[in-house]
């Protein structure tokens, strides 16, 4: 109806006028308020939180956290948002440490609008706690998950703005895949697989690849040591200070770095082999992650979905025709592979 459209446009104009000056002030408020929180304050300051529209908008924001829609990733959906009907969209996600959550929005609308994207962590017995927010003028949020658990993505357009809102949520790997040209399909042995007839557990993943395939740093870091031990053979330890983790690369045919060196993600640390207790098995990289003050954690979520880049040919490049590159099929899910 034409008069509904007219009322919506008039209301939008009034809200815009009331908020325009406020938001400039809010953007410099101390305390690290998220854009959504700053917007709520500006509604309150403008006296809009007691209008029917303001109340509906605030209620929608709360409801999205109380009744989120359980969602598996990746997901993509398009929603038609009516300007006069305040809504918020809550998605409940199970996320693992080592995944990077990507939220991408596009808004097709007559007028530009702010859309607030906020990420909350769900903890039993507590209100969801905010962990990240998109910047005010951004329609994307990217956040690395530091703890396994349930999270809520809340998406809410500002008052009196409508249009077609396309929402895409997915996760990517936080780390670089540590073997050149390979991906998670080359993993044949997993975290906590039994070893030695169940007397110990596998504290990493085994990634099978032809002998002499470059082994790559999974993140920026510092080579803590490059040496030899009985189980791992030729090994490299890298400290990842940003995540407070150490990475363990074992069974290398040889190392390409030494202790104390700084490395960037994708740098060559060594080459795939079968040294240590992997002798007699097909060449593979044993890749482990040890969180400081915690111990071994599952590397798989950190690298799933990534493909190891081919390093640029360098002076320390491996032999041009790698031995063992042909006819060597890894076992489907080997047991007894060491390290
Ligand atoms: Zn292993």
Image (cartoon, rainbow, N blue to C red):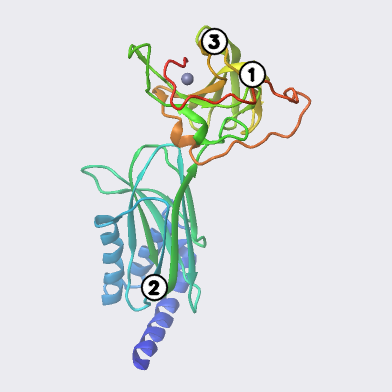
* Residue at the extreme bottom of the image, as rendered: 2
Instruction: Write down the quadrant of residue 78 in the picture.
Output: bottom left
205 vs 41, left or right, is right
18 versus 134 height, above or below:
below
Report helix, strand or loop for mark 3. helix
Q: Secondary structure at mark 2?
A: strand
Q: Quadrant of residue 225?
A: top right
Identify residue for label 3.
276
Q: Is the residue at mark 1 in contact range of ligand 1, meaning its CB lies under 8 Å from it?
A: no
- N-terminal of the two: label 2 or label 1? 2
Name the disc covering residue 73, or none: none
Mark 1 crowdedness (10 Å alpha carbons): few <14, some 14-19, many ≥20: few
Answer above or below: position of 96 versus 33.
above
Residue on which the image places disc 1: 260
Q: Position of residue 292 (x, y in %)?
A: 44, 23
Q: What crowding class fits label 3: few (fewer than 14 Cα within 10 Å), some (14-19), or many (20 or more)?
A: many
The disc, 3 or 2, on the residue closer to the chain's N-terminal end is 2
Q: Earlier in the sequence, mark 1 or mark 3?
A: 1
Spot occupied by residue 144 in the image (x, y as percentages of width and height): 46, 42
């Amino acid at each position: 109806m034409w008069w509904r459209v007219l009322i919506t446009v008039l209301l939008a104009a009034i809200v815009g006028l009331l908020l325009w000056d406020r938001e400039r002030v809010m953007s410099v408020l101390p305390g690290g308020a998220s854009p959504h929180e700053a917007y709520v304050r500006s509604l309150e300051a403008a006296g809009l939180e007691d209008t029917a529209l303001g109340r509906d908008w605030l209620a929608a924001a709360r409801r999205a956290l109380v009744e989120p829609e359980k969602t598996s990733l990746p997901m993509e959906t398009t929603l038609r948002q009516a300007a006069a009907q305040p809504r918020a969209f809550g998605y409940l996600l199970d996320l693992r440490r080592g995944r990077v959550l990507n939220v991408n929005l596009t808004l097709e609308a007559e007028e530009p609008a702010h859309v607030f994207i906020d990420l909350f962590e769900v903890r039993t017995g507590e209100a969801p706690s905010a962990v990240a927010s998109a910047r005010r003028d951004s329609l994307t949020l990217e956040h690395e998950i530091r703890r396994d658990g349930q999270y809520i993505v809340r998406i809410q357009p500002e008052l009196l703005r409508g249009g077609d809102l396309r929402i895409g949520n997915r996760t990517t790997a936080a780390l670089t895949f540590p073997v050149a040209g390979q991906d998670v399909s080359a993993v044949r042995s997993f975290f906590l697989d039994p070893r030695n007839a169940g007397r110990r557990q596998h504290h990493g993943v085994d990634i099978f690849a032809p002998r002499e395939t470059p082994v790559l740093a999974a993140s920026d870091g510092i080579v803590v040591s490059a040496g030899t031990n009985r189980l791992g053979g030729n090994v490299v330890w890298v400290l990842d200070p940003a995540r407070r983790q150490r990475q363990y690369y074992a069974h290398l045919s040889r190392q390409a770095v030494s202790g104390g060196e700084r490395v960037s993600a994708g740098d060559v640390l060594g080459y795939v082999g079968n040294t240590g207790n992997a002798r007699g098995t097909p060449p593979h990289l044993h890749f482990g992650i040890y969180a400081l003050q915690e111990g071994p954690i599952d590397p798989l979520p950190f690298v799933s979905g990534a493909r190891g880049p081919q390093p640029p040919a360098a002076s320390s490049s491996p032999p041009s025709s790698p031995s063992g590159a042909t006819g060597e099929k890894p076992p489907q899910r080997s047991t007894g592979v060491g390290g």
